[in-house]
Image (cartoon, rainbow, N blue to C red):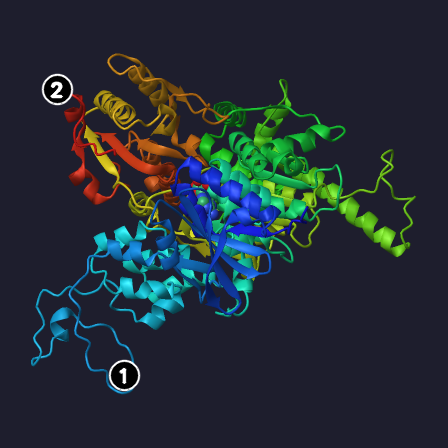
Amino acid sequence: MSQGVRTQVTVTPQANEDIRRLDAATKNAVGDFVRRLRTDRSNRALRLVFLRETGGNGRLFLASLDGSRMGLLLETEENRFSLLAVRVGPAARDELARLTVEINAVSGGVELVDQSEVSAQVVAMPARPEPDPAPDAVPAEAPAAEEAASPSEPVPTALPVPLFARYDDGELVELGVIASLLPALRRITDGRQLEAVLGHNLPGLTREVLLALHDGMEPSEVRAFVTDQWRADGRVDPQDWAQAARRPVSQVSTEDAAVLDALGDGFEAWRLFLHPEQRRLATTSFKGSAKVTGGPGTGKTVVALHRVRYLVDRLPPGQTRPVLLTTYNTNLAADLGERLHRLGGDALVRRVDVKSVDQVAREVVEQHPGSVLGTPMGDEEAMALWHRACTEVGVFDYDADFLDAEFKHVILAQGCGTERLYFRAERKGRGVLQRADRKKVWELVQAYRSLLDGPPRRTTYALIADEAARIEGRHMAKAVEQARYKEEHGGLDLVHREAGSGMWLKPRYRHVVVDEAQDLSASHWRMLRAMTAPGPDDIFLVGDAHQRIYSHQVVLGRLGINTPGRASRRLTLNYRTTREILGSAHGLVHGESFDDLDDGADTLDGYRSVLTGLAPQYWRAPDWETEMRAIAALLKERHERYGTPYAAMAVSVPDKDAVTQLAYTLACKPFLIPASEIGREGPRDVDTVHIGTMHRFKGLEFQRVFLAGVSEGLIPHQRIETFRLSSPDRYRQEEQRARSLLFVAATRARDELIVTWHGRASRYLPRQADRDAGRASSLLREDGPPSGSNAA
Ligand SMILES: Nc1ncnc2c1ncn2[C@@H]1O[C@H](COP(=O)(O)OP(=O)(O)OP(=O)(O)O)[C@@H](O)[C@H]1O
């Protein structure tokens, strides 16, 4: 029996896309073929046929996967193959043979272009007469068609100008466009043709660059936001196919099992192929902490999950959980746990604590000897207690909201344990509060605290976090002291062991990874900082200040979390939402300024998507009843006519009452639409439309999202008008928060965003929304299904 030759086979992102677009039988055929090739490449039944040299150290082969399916393979070293493309049908062999394969000058990845398919998409324009080039002419911006015509050589006046005429070949290639696409690109003259070409399976970098230029980004911006993120580490040798094939950009996954799984079923793209910048962030070793910001849907959570896997892969073997993965609320923590399991199974999840940050804090306090934990109060109860404190002290100058925020965001945030410290506290963004006022506020705070301590003992999540930060701070100080003692006494470990434990005190975690970082409070950060020793890869955080809806700005640098230089990075490519939806969502926060979770500013510059789809729709109603019925009609239409499952649609409403009212309307005749409320634990996995207040939409995504009740007076709520004159800083903050809420809700939509209101449209909607809006009552006519809703 002959000894089989073990072979390595990887799949390129473009081949993966081919397979994804083809049917299940193709996936199986490819899976079988890859397994057989791995086992023994010398097996003649594989029918590998040499096609041509690529130049340098690469060779192309054609392989028959089964009767009608063929693949194109690149061999770069002995017994190392990359699957580049798959085609089906009688012309498969010819199509594969015609593909141009090259090494991208920027990313260093193996890329290909299907010239025949691309050319078929481009409507050939009349050939332009080439101007006589001057001997040392530098390619310049293409002149407009009329200018190009010389008097002696008349050119038809209607000759269209190629879409990318402003950029010469060198510039496009330097930005990352695959060189073999250039001839076809030069013939594209309008957006429709470009869209058709982009509909083809082009290399990712090329697609991103062309869209960014077409959207009007300057080449310098494209370089910064797109090209640099794809740029290979080290020099790219255009002849070194072995090096190119080994780069992560040329492989969907480095794990055999993942690739084979992917061929078998719908393995999500993010588990297989990270954007080069995402990969870099997930797998770089940092000297200390690192921070990733980026607009909604840019894959920050995906990066955090891959980061956890990277950190776990580097742990010494053991049974402990030295990595904490945490986020703002419980339902997001549950979601993170599930996604982490999908990424790395039990082996990964076993080494990681996945919990909401308040749960972490609560456990710290509960486990601490002598701590008495009260019952955490809800917001309404806290407000009632502030009112009682005011009555007891006899001071009525401040409202409960103000006092609660002052307590959380100034006193607890800055750890003001005494009145003197509070007098000196910074109140950034909260206006001026004179010493006499601070004295009164301090008195109210003391009254509030004794009410909390009195029976029945109560507490708040903010106080639990504050207490947990103190406990962990003391724990870390002791651990540092022990380590110093041990060092000074040459490893002697008897004296300073924690009484009864028989153990050296250690920081609780080796690595902490934080999602939704913008919403954590200063106490949370103090606790997390004290849970891991400062050092390589200690804290990795991802967040976006544009989406801050709970906490106030925190300057991480002041809490001992420093992310200087390249340890602070920003993601700009949105994977969730279409360009059309993003364009309108962007407008919601335009003009406001946002922080970078530290003491710098953040923007959405370079924020973009490569997905295209429907323009957002606007519907105006005379009253809430009509608006709700119109939403019901649109939901029903999308379900019945376009087959969208109810569970793939969600409606955000301005307040809790509206949730109940809308669920009732949907349930009534003639609609009979099942609906459920998005609760604290997130949406339940049943076939119902999900309804929730905008806060509940954080971190979620749905195929179709309805933003209901986007009326003036509701968004922002009219109660903030009381601050307009009395507290301009507060007014500004409330406005910014209301915008952020709307922004978060709008950016949950994958394919379609529908905005509805009654009365006047919210001031945050674009000016044309009212002009373009349809009349909601027209959707309720008896004469058939709603028209003009364009949901396909
Ligand atoms: N490299 C990738 N390939 C394919 N899909 C991706 C990739 N990265 C992210 N995604 C998808 O994009 C969507 C958004 O990703 P993710 O939730 O990580 O973004 P985010 O930045 O955390 O969003 P938000 O801030 O809005 O919560 C998800 O559906 C995710 O699966």
Q: Is residue 358 left or right of residue 754?
A: right
Q: Which residue is mark 1?
A: 137
Identify the disc placed on residue 186: none
In this rendered view, identify the residue nearer to me: 775 or 50.
50
The amino acid on which the numbered mark 1 sits, given as a three-letter code, is Ala
Within the image, what quadrant is residue 206 found in? bottom left
Q: Is 129 placed left or right of 521 in the picture?
A: left
Q: Quadrant of the C terminus?
A: top left
Q: CA distance from mark 2 to mark 1?
A: 67 Å
Q: Quadrant of ligand 1?
A: top left
Residue 499 seen: yes
Front residue of this view, candidates 555 and 678? 678
Of residues 313 and 726, the one drawn nearer to the viewer in this rendering:
313
Q: Residue tagged by mark 2?
A: 783
Residue at the top extreme, as displayed: 669
Any part of residue 271 in sight? no
Q: Amino acid at mark 2?
A: Asp
Q: Earlier in the sequence, mark 2 or mark 1?
A: 1
What is the secondary structure assignment of the residue under circle 2? loop
Q: Position of residue 575 (x, y in %)?
A: 41, 45
x, y percentage for residue 160?
15, 64
Q: Position of residue 36 (x, y in %)?
A: 57, 44
Q: Where's residue 423, x and y in %?
A: 57, 46
Q: Callout 2 environment at 10 Å: few (<14), some (14 to 19), or many (20+)? A: few
Q: Residue at x 55, y 24 (%)?
A: 377
Left or right: 649 in relation to 503: left
Image: 496 above or below 627: below
